[in-house]
Amino acid sequence: MIDPEDRFWADGQCYFGSSDNPKTEFQCHVWDWDQLRVVKIKGTAKLFKEDEDIELGVFAPLADYLSPEVRSITVNDDGLLIAVSNDLEEDDAPYVAYPAFALCESLSHCTKVQHSELQEVDRLGPFVDHVSYNDECGTPHKAVFKYNVMDKPLRLQMAWDEINILSLLPPHPNILPLDHIVVEGDESRVLGFTTRYIPGGTLANPKITFRFEWLRQLTQVVDYLNVELGIMHQDIAPRNLLIDDETDKILLFDFDRAASGKKNLSDGRDDVTAVAFTLYQLITNDKSFSQILHWDRTVDMVQNISEWPTHRPLDAEVSEFRNFLNEWIATRSDGDMERYLNAPCRFTWPDRPELPEYNVPFQLGTFEDGKPYMTTGPRCRRTAMKLGQYCFRWERPPQIRLSKAE
């Protein structure tokens, strides 16, 4: 089940007048990652004060009880529900034009599975589900399905880059490989991908004994990615390290922030620094450094801490972990960026394909003379539906309701 703290996200806060006037109308959108829906909230500035961010607290108690048809809600100045609307014109869900598989030549070598063949088992987090399916031979498989429901340019780019990186990564014992491309519709629209489900959980669980061998594996896979392939993961953390109980190895996953050479490379997100902070957090369970912006982090912040208090079972002394880490960092210090940028086996992939759906004009409004103002580009789902464009509907019942039904 999705962590309640991660379930909701507010976007598009707007005041129709001065926010200092308590009678000013207010609107915002709240995404519910459990139900994969967006609902518009309406109220006044008396309740929704600037910089207080109470939208999620107002919406959360209502989320599981609203009809799937509800597009917007109105609350009074005490935050109590006073009206709901099923009007399709209130539906501000964005339109995402998922590319047809035929347009994704870089993925042509990958195997596909229909979204309709996936059976939901659990909801692991925003955009991530535990699913099962039967392959071509009828053999059942457990998998993790990762997808994107937003039209934000960064989200679309991250989804495209990750699926391509995984499709091109050579097999490695410490990298979770791509399983299938998930498609749907007559044109096999690419919705996301699956990876193998690993039941052992991640190292974010402080009760898991951390082994010295896993640190060695982590540094080896980072060296392989950085120096051989010219790939910078850029998000190494305990939550992105799985434990494969079958092989007793760690598996690195979640490549949606990865860089290839200078492409997508971000300041302060180098993997060597991330490994140091990850090891410190694994041993001490101190998460305070994760609050520091990446570009403000330096490896000596944790290296220079004299004592690392142990708050996790370990199979070796803390000094052994630290000595190994320090020696490894020393091997990566001199000319490290040059080696990364000149990696001998770097691979490339094409840009996200231009999708013809966004070139179809639609009416955004009217000019002063009453003539329609036409435009192209991103649009609401309701607009795309009026134009007859293919729209994938992600909405689903709240998981708590499904659990009770079982």
Image (cartoon, rainbow, N blue to C red):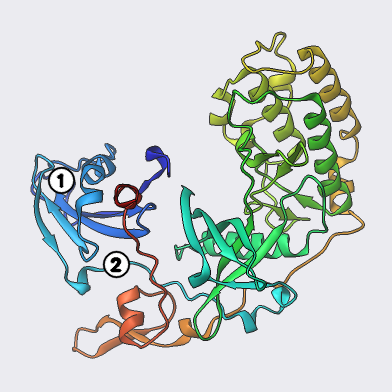
Residue 119 against residue 391 in the figure, above or below: above
Residue 25 against residue 318 in the figure, above or below: below
Looking at the picture, how far across and down is residue 181, in whole percent? 63, 69
Mark 1 vs 2: CB contact within 8 A: no
Q: Which residue is mark 1?
A: 45
The residue carrying pointer 2 sits among few (fewer than 14), some (14 to 19) or many (20 or more) residues within 10 Å by Cα, namely: some
Q: Secondary structure at mark 2?
A: loop
140 relative to 338 in the view: left or right: left
Looking at the picture, how far across and down is residue 374, in whole percent? 34, 86
Q: Secondary structure at mark 1?
A: loop
Residue 55 seen in this snapshot: yes
Q: Which residue is mark 2?
A: 92
241 relative to 288 in the view: left or right: right
Looking at the picture, how far across and down is residue 393, in whole percent? 38, 71
The residue nearer to you, when weighing 78 against 340, is 78
Looking at the picture, how far across and down is residue 80, in whole percent? 10, 44
Task: Quadrant for the N terminus, please.
Answer: top left
Of marks 1 and 2, which one's residue comes earlier in the chain? 1
205 relative to 266 in the view: left or right: left
The residue carrying pointer 1 sits among few (fewer than 14), some (14 to 19) or many (20 or more) residues within 10 Å by Cα, namely: many
Residue 161 against residue 278 in the figure, above or below: below
Residue occupying image coordinates x 69% and y 20%: 302
The part of the image, by quadrant, that contains residue 178 is bottom right
The residue nearer to you, when weighing 230 against 7, is 7
Q: Nearer the viewer, mark 1 or mark 2?
A: 2
Q: Amino acid at mark 2?
A: Asp
Residue occupying image coordinates x 22% and y 64%: 71
Q: CA distance from mark 1 to mark 2?
A: 21 Å
The part of the image, by quadrant, that contains residue 35 is bottom left
